[in-house]
Image (tube, rainbow, N blue to C red):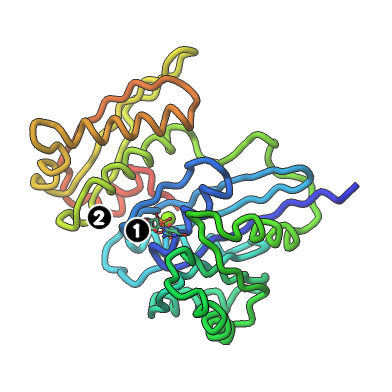
Amino acid sequence: MTASRCGFIAIVGRPNVGKSTLLNHILGQKLSITSRKPQTTRHQVLGIKTEGNCQAIYVDTPGLHRRNEKAINRYMNRTANSALKDVDLVLFVVDRDQWTDEDDIVLQRIQQVDCPVILVINKVDRLADKKALLPLIGQLGEKHDFAEIVPVSALRGHNRDDLEALIERYLPESVHFYPEDQITDRSERFLAAELVREKVMRQLGEEVPYEVTVEIEEFKTSPKLTEISALILVERAGQKKIIIGEGGSRMRQIGAEARRDMEKLFDSKVMLRLWVKVKSGWSDDERALRSLGYND
Ligand code: GDP
Ligand code: K
Ligand code: MG
């Protein structure tokens, strides 16, 4: 019989390289919200996968980024930094098409950790010329003494299983920390708020900055139905108008999509009520942030 293994794996990288997408596909569940916009992930989320004797505990993080001017940005950077403490392995995710100075910020940070780091070159499905991969691996390999370099497509699946098999080899022999059927450390309430925020972020164009948060006002479960009331908080009246849309059309779509995802994740029928409210200054107010669940 093989030994029992269990360990923590931090997924780090600049915003938008596909960290949350990778985690969701490894877990086979949509746990961490994703979108084309940077700074979609704000909180640390644990994704737990137990297969046979191995329990891999992934820590998805907000991308480490440069914008530090607001309390919410400082919160996200603190969260991403603290995720690197006490892990057994780091996955440093980069995009195949460009290395930016934000990647350098992450690189500097991982040079201070003493566990192995696997470089994950993501989105190779988008690589126009597959021959470019080898020189790219060579070039990126010089930046740090990586334990492994793995090109993947988090979205389409290329090399994902190989990456998981590699990860397992780096996890220490240990008893499992979580029950076999637990997939996250977060409550359903938290996951519900995140799913609403994902739909809002995906619906909004560039005209609305990342000034949206979601508060769950009611979360009632019975064997037949989960009833959820969620409040969408924005900074300005114009943003409220955009989210509601013509005759409430955008709100209806946000609600329908969020409800569909919740029903899948919670395996229950869901009734979802949504409201939008303007609360100026929440994203730059340390106290308001704490009351909205941005604790570290
Ligand atoms: P994060 O900010 O690093 O967590 O990035 P997300 O997981 O939110 O992904 C950012 C965007 O990249 C989303 O639109 C994803 O659908 C897209 N994406 C992620 N992985 C891949 C991939 O392997 N291939 C392609 N083509 N797109 C991807
Ligand atoms: K994103
Ligand atoms: Mg993310």
Number of marks present in the image shown: 2
139 with respect to 70 (left or right)? right
Say if 80 sits above or below 219 in the image. Answer: below
Residue 210 numbered tag: 2
First-in-chain label (2 vs 1)? 1
Q: Position of residue 71 (x, y in %)?
A: 30, 60
Say if 116 sits above or below 243 in the image. Answer: below
At label 2, the amino acid type is Tyr
Residue 255 numbered tag: none
**Cα distance in 3D space between marks 2 and 1:** 8 Å
Q: Assess disc 1: are there few (<14), some (14-19) or many (≥20) residues with their C-alpha within 10 Å of its C-alpha.
A: many
Say if 188 sits above or below 284 in the image. Answer: above
Look at the numbered disc 2 and give the secondary structure of its residue: loop
Q: Which residue is mark 1?
A: 39
Q: Position of residue 49 (x, y in %)?
A: 64, 45
Q: Quadrant of ligand 3?
A: bottom left
Residue at 27 percent of width and 31 percent of height: 255
Look at the numbered disc 1 and give the secondary structure of its residue: loop
Q: Position of residue 70 (x, y in %)?
A: 27, 63
Label 1 CB less than 8 angstroms from ligand 2? yes
Q: Position of residue 170 (x, y in %)?
A: 73, 63
Say if 172 sits above or below 26 in the image. Answer: below
Query: Is disc 2 in contact with disc 1, using a CB cutoff of under 8 Å?
Result: yes
Residue at 44 percent of width and 75 percent of height: 103
At label 1, the amino acid type is Gln
**237 vs 26, nearest the viewer:** 26
195 with respect to 247 (left or right)? right
187 with respect to 239 (left or right)? right
